[in-house]
Amino acid sequence: MKTFVFALAACLTFGATQAQLTPFELSKDKNYTANYPEVISYYNKLAKTSPQMKLINYGMTDIGKPLTLVVLSRDKIFDPALIKKQNKRILLINNGIHPGEPEGIDASMMFARDLLKKNVLPKNVVICIVALYNIDGSMNRGLSRINQNGPSAYGFRGNSRNLDLNRDFIKADSRNTLALETIINTWQPEIFLDNHTSDGADYQYVMTLIETQKDKQNPILAEYTSRTLSPELYKRMKQSGFEMTPYVESEDESPDGGIISFLETPRFATGYTAQHNIISYITETHMLKEFNKRVYATYDFMQALVDINERDAKLIGEVKAKADEQVKQQKTFALNWDVDTKNYDTLTFKGYAAGYKPSEVSGLPRLYYDRSKPYTKTIKYFDNYVATATADKPVAYVIPQAWGKIIDLYKLNKVAMRQLVHDTTLDLQMYYIADYKTGQRPYEGHYLHTGVKLTPTNMKIKFHAGDYVVYTNQTLNRFIVETLEPQGVDSYFAWNFFDSVLASKEGYSPYVFEDVAAELLKKDPGLRKKLDDEKLKDPALAKSASAQLNFVYHNSPYFEKTYLRYPVGRLLVNTKLDLK
Ligand SMILES: [Zn+2]
């Protein structure tokens, strides 16, 4: 910090250009990342002298500070609707979701300044930069990423509620998420970039890249990104001296056995933006490279992305429109994915020889990378995924207004919703939750449900005036289906939004119900047969008086029909409804 204060004092005598240097550039060894007040004050100063730049605050984050969006617009138009009307593209860059991975924060400050001062803002692209997303975490400054090579201090991963904001995009527990989702749905970018730093293996690259997994991505967007945009990014980064590799995630400890394409499910920023048909990338600079190289690599990546976006502006607009149209018509949606381990590609990888030696801590074998033995070899690249669960969309979902958080999130996401004018009884397909598993310990503040099994049941359900009808003819179909289908890996059901339907509310005293149950069995031979059949199949039931009583109760008209019934209905037949 002392070094920085000195450097800043010194620069004041050098005139205007020096004053526009960022705290990172002013630091002696370029091993410094700007803190939150420095970031905001830097952009504020820059905006004062730059009419092509505007700072817009959104919402409030959990720590009580607004989320600042830096908008760079060559024509000085800062109204997203007007920008859309002019058929310009919008690029959104997010920084500091993990404040311990801060390259994007510093690189974006330099990048914005250079675009303005060199007067090279793109004609066809408006650039929006989230200056520092996880403000909370960034204010909790220290050295919490033990393996990372600089900067000298940086923020903490969790926000002030100790949430990892890059797992919060569906459950939206933090106010940071609500603010960022407001930005995304207000500006509706065609391209989104989230800047990070990697963990994991050692290798030669400074920069690695995650692109939306191609099998999960909208096929029209995937066609453009996998054939044009991504190869071009790799090419340009190689030319700029920061050759990239796909993000290094592997089954084994070292990448020698192959790397697996990262699957960003909807809980992640880029999984959520993929649901909105936004082309999405995550940069992951390598934690062991010097901080300044990581910052400059991030800068160069953003430059390449802006340049290609500018070059392909018209095409990207067309591709996005086509993808939006396709998803409106799409009938079946994947809800979960698994890597196809049998069907892999290969790639050329520049790594370091990995080996094992005795640990000085435990005496047991430990992994190490020998940087004196760099290699270039062909490794397996597991970049094919297959859907493990799918759902056919209904004509519409019907959501009781009682589930207010979902209604609020749908409004925020600009999902088109209508409301029933009158109390209305509808013929719907309802799901009964037949089975599910729940984590034993909380994950990001929730006990996630997985392995959900459903029993679809057609029935009449009474809804109330004001309940919501969500037709599935929307560009947001994917977001709608993936959040409302309980088997979705990041569905609202998985994230505990509907847990209250998983417990029954009433019961019985056995000594009283014995007589009622006996009467029921006498009057209903079908029920008697059902019980007898079940006893033959299940010896435990045959031996247990209480289990048989319970069986009769569950199959009686007295049993609550809402127990384990998923409350969102599926309208399968287009029915005329009185809606407002
Ligand atoms: Zn990260």
Image: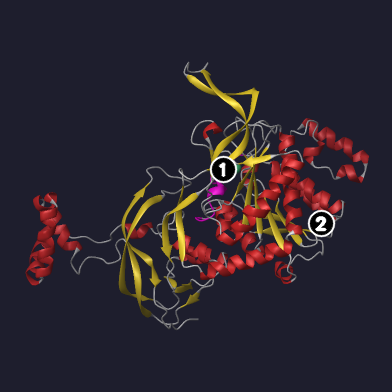
In which quadrant of the rendered view does residue 8 lie?
Answer: top right
Q: Position of residue 504 (x, y in %)?
A: 28, 59
Q: Position of residue 555 (x, y in %)?
A: 19, 64
Asked whether residue 168 is drawn in magenta, I would say yes
**In front: 43, or 269?**
269
Which secondary structure lies at badge 1?
A: loop
Queried on whether the Cβ of the residue with tag 1 lies below 8 angstroms from ligand 1, the answer reads no
Reading the image, the residue beneath label 2 is 121
The residue mark sitting in front, 2 or 1, is 2
Q: Ligand 1 falls in which quarter?
A: top right
| Spatial CA span between label 2 and label 1 | 34 Å
Which secondary structure lies at badge 2?
A: loop
Q: What is the chief secondary structure element of the magenta stretch? A: loop
| Residue 491 appearing in the image | no
**In front: 367, or 174?**
367
The residue sitting at 42% across, 62% down in the picture is: 391
Total number of numbered discs in the rendering: 2
Amino acid type of the residue tagged 2 in the rendering: Leu
Queried on whether the Cβ of the residue with tag 2 lies below 8 angstroms from ligand 1, the answer reads no
The quarter of the rendered structure image containing the N terminus is top right
- Res. 356 mark: none
The residue sitting at 57% across, 68% down in the picture is: 414
In which quadrant of the rendered view does residue 508 lie?
Answer: bottom left
Reading the image, the residue beneath label 1 is 158
Left or right of residue 100: residue 33: right
The residue sitting at 66% across, 50% down in the picture is: 230
Point out the tag, 2 or 1, that comes first from the N-terminus: 2
Q: Which residues are magenta?
A: 156-171
